[in-house]
Each structure stands twice: as C-alpha cells, then as structure tokens.
Amino acid sequence: MDEALINKENVRILLANDDGIDALGLKILEKVANTLSSEVWIVAPVKEQSATGHSLTLRRPLRIIKRGQRRFAVNGTPTDCVLLAVNQIMKHCKPDLVLSGVNKGRNVGEDMTYSGTVAAAMEATLFGIPAIALSQDMNEEDHRDLSQNTKRIYSAAQGYAAQVIKKVTQVAWQKDVLINVNFPAVLSKDVRGIEVTREGRSNKLSDEIIEHRDPRDKRYYWIGQRRGSTKHPVGTDINAIERNAISITPISMNLTHKPTIKILKGVFGSD
C-alpha cells in the first residue's frame, strides 16, 4: 500500500468471508464497513467454506448469484470470490480495500494456512489490494450458542473492529503483506488491549482423530481439534488471544526463507 487509505475521501470496500454470505460475522463486518465507507460490496460463498485454505475451483463451473445491491454469492471458495469480484463483478470499479470475516473462530498460528478467511485476504494481496482478515475467537459454548448469543459472542469484534481498521489503514504497508486480526473470546469491556504480534505455533500433537464405524462396519474418521496447554511465547498471536488481547499480525506473501538460500548456494556452489 503506497499511501494511507485513511487519506482517501471514499474508500471502496469489498467484503468476503469463508462462513458464507448469510453468516452472522459477515453481517457484523458489513455494519462496521458501512461506518467507514458509503460504498461497500459483498462477494461471499453461497455456503460455508471453512478450512478451504487458498484453493481455487478448477473442475466445475462457478456461478455468480446477485443477492441485492452490491451483494453477490458465489458457489465456490473464498479465493474464488475475491478473484471473481476483482476480475468480473467489480472490474470497472476495483476495490481499494478488502476485509475478510468476521470469522467464527480464531485464525492464529499455523491455523492461518488452512483458513479461508485469511485466503481471501491473500488473494486480494496478490492483486495488490490492501487486505485485512478478521476473526473472532470462540470457546465451545460459544459455538453451541451462536444463534442465541450473537451480541455477546461477537462483542469484542463489534466493539473494536472499526477502530482497528481505521488505525491499520492510517499507515502504509508493503504490497505483499496482509494484516491478520484476531479478537479474543470476551466481552468488549474485558478486552485487554491491542497488541502487534508475530505468528505463533500451537501444539499440533493435541489434534484429535476421532474414529467411528458406519452401518457397514467400515471405519471413518473426523479430524477434531483440542487446544493444548502449552504456554505460548509473549509477542505471539496465540499468547495475545489467550490473555484476552486483540492480536494484529502482518503476514508476508513471500514465503522464501532467505537464510536457507545462502546455505543451499554453498552446497551447490552458486554465487
């Protein structure tokens, strides 16, 4: 981003997500976006696409379904949605900013690599469009009561999303960088600050494989997730969220590990 978006008089905002166009988190993000701009577009999946990562649909046709003024549903992944938004739906009025979320569940540590929410922001970043992914941490009770206690469950996001977006877009960041924001699973009044963090690592050994048998006595499996009790270093996104702080992590799209380049050049005799 060459200049601060806050300097633009009317930012054109595109919203996407991985929970689907009817998701509660998207409705909350739409309300937030409407306080920041008078031109908000929505292009989101027809149905939930969680954990699809940065995947494209290549083996079946995609359809764009108009759901209202500047509101469209796509029968594909979050990446498909941003791709179609930029190259088709909004090809004559490209977005200045892409906001993805608010996801029902946190996207911290290596979970970012699976996240459709982060993937939508990644796709926008590849187009050179500033992008912010926003996710709301939830506990197991929150997930069970999602339709009943929306105001409480999304309280932190509702209370802080506009402020975070305004502050983040006051500064310029590199074109190959996206911003990943996570809100803790507490009421807005109980949020313990906003922290700029680095990517952490969760205890992957705590992932759970659940085995069952079907009526034909054949095994099948569910991949479950259990959060480990490992303490996470201060300064990481996971540590911030677990201390009830908002985490803001800049993520680079350039995956090259430069120190290893030097090592490999030594092995292969390159300059």
Image: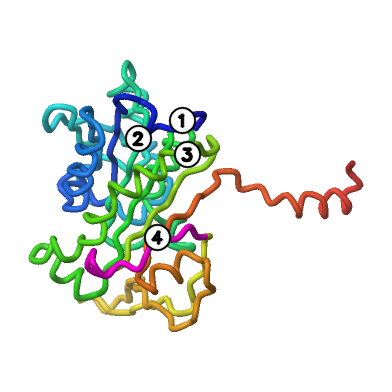
Q: Badge 4 is on which residue?
A: 194
Three-letter amino acid code at disc 3? Val
Q: Is residue 259 above or below residue 34?
A: below
- In percent of the image, x 39 and y 28: which residue is there? 7
Q: Residues within 10 Å of mark 2 (few under 14, many from 20)?
A: many
Three-letter amino acid code at disc 1? Phe
| Image quadrant containing the C terminus | top right
Q: Are marks 2 and 1 in contact (CB under 8 Å)?
A: yes
Instruction: Tell me, for residue 127, which label it has, or none.
Output: 1
**Which residue occupies the extreme bottom position in the image?**
229
Badge 4 marks a residue whose secondary structure is strand
Residue 235 x/y as whole percent: 52, 66
**Which residue occupies the extreme left position in the image?**
148
Q: Residues within 10 Å of mark 3 (few under 14, many from 20)?
A: some
Residue 9 x/y as whole percent: 31, 24
- In percent of the image, x 50 and y 60: which residue is there? 197
Q: Badge 3 is on which residue?
A: 171
Q: Earlier in the sequence, mark 4 or mark 3?
A: 3
- In percent of the image, x 24 and y 75: which residue is there? 140
Q: Are marks 3 and 2 in contact (CB under 8 Å)?
A: no
- In percent of the image, x 48 and y 82: which residue is there? 230
Badge 1 marks a residue whose secondary structure is loop
Q: Earlier in the sequence, mark 4 or mark 1?
A: 1
In the image, taking residue 108 as reference, residue 95 lies left or right, namely: left
- The magenta stretch spans which residues? 185-197
* Spatial separation of the CA atoms under disc 4 and disc 3: 16 Å
